[in-house]
Amino acid sequence: MVGSGKMLSRVLIGLGLALAVLPVVMILSGAVSLGRDYRIANRDSAGIAPDPAETPEAVVQVYAARALNWRGIFGVHTWIATKPENAPHFTVHQVIGWRVLRDLPAVFSETAIPDRNWFGNRPEIIAELRGKEATEAIAKIAEAVETYPYVDEYRLWPGPNSNTFTAYVARKVPELKLDLPVTAIGKDYPINGALFERTPSGTGYQISLYGVLGILLSRQEGLELNLIGLSFGIDFARPALKLPFIGRLGFG
């Protein structure tokens, strides 16, 4: 019993040190910029989305980018972009918190540049479908956007937020096989209080207590532990450690 107690103490101390050090690493490495003025921050295309004029096939893309200023230390903002076959533009679906403060729906769909920098932070594509798969998925995505249950709610932590929305849509569209990064805080927030549900990728299951405590096991996501909304994990399919603040350390 004494030995077990010492081991637990060491684990807790190590965890505490990691939670203290990792945010500092993010700032010192330049991965996160503080004090950026959102009014003049870069919102240009990152140049990674296909040009609709040159891409007749249907396209679905899911993006993630570090959140603005101090929020970016902790995590990312995610959104979904869709372009039906022969469409001249993309439609971007996302949840934006400030809209709730103005008595507007949190869910916002608009014709927009799909790969815009998120207020100076470059996005990355975390899932993509093209052709017939994309065509079939677009209809399901549109339906999921309409049925998202937290359209008038937004909480930065532990959710529901933009990542809760993306995870909800992904569960309704398993073709995406979406492996949301552990830095997508809010992805584990349960829909309508459900304790047990499928993972966003649709390849496993998770238990989540209000998004602040949980465990996830999946072929796509691997093994993840959620403690106070921060996730630690191991990706077995593409060997990597998953750490809060930082994200993936490994392959892929």
Image (tube, grey):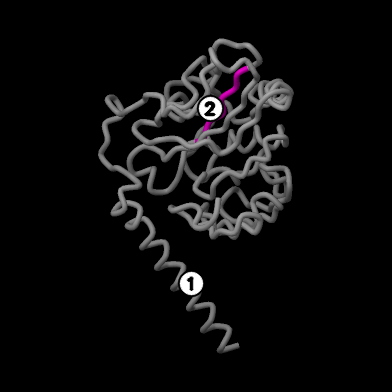
Amino acid under disc 1: Leu
Residue 188 lies in the magenta-colored region: no
* Residue at 56% across, 28% down: 80
Residue identified by numbered label 2:
94
Mark 1 nearby-residue class (10 Å; few <14, some 14–19, many ≥20) = few
Q: Nearer the viewer, residue 133 or 112?
A: 133
Of the 4 image quadrants, the one containing the N terminus is bottom right
Residue 215 rendering spot, x and y as whole percentages: 64, 57
* Residue at 46% across, 41% down: 76
Please give left or right for residue 145 compared with residue 152 in the image. Answer: right
* Residue at 48% across, 72% down: 12
Mark 2 nearby-residue class (10 Å; few <14, some 14–19, many ≥20) = many
The furthest residue to the front: 54
Q: Nearer the viewer, residue 186 or 101?
A: 186
Residue 90: which quarter of the image? top right
* Residue at 66% across, 21% down: 142
Magenta span: predominant SS is: strand
How far apart in space, not on screen, are marks 1 and 2 (Cα)?
36 Å
Closer to viewer: mark 1 or mark 2: 2
Residue identified by numbered label 1:
12
Residue 60: which quarter of the image? top right
Q: Which residues are magenta?
A: 78-83
Mark 1 or 2 closer to N-term? 1
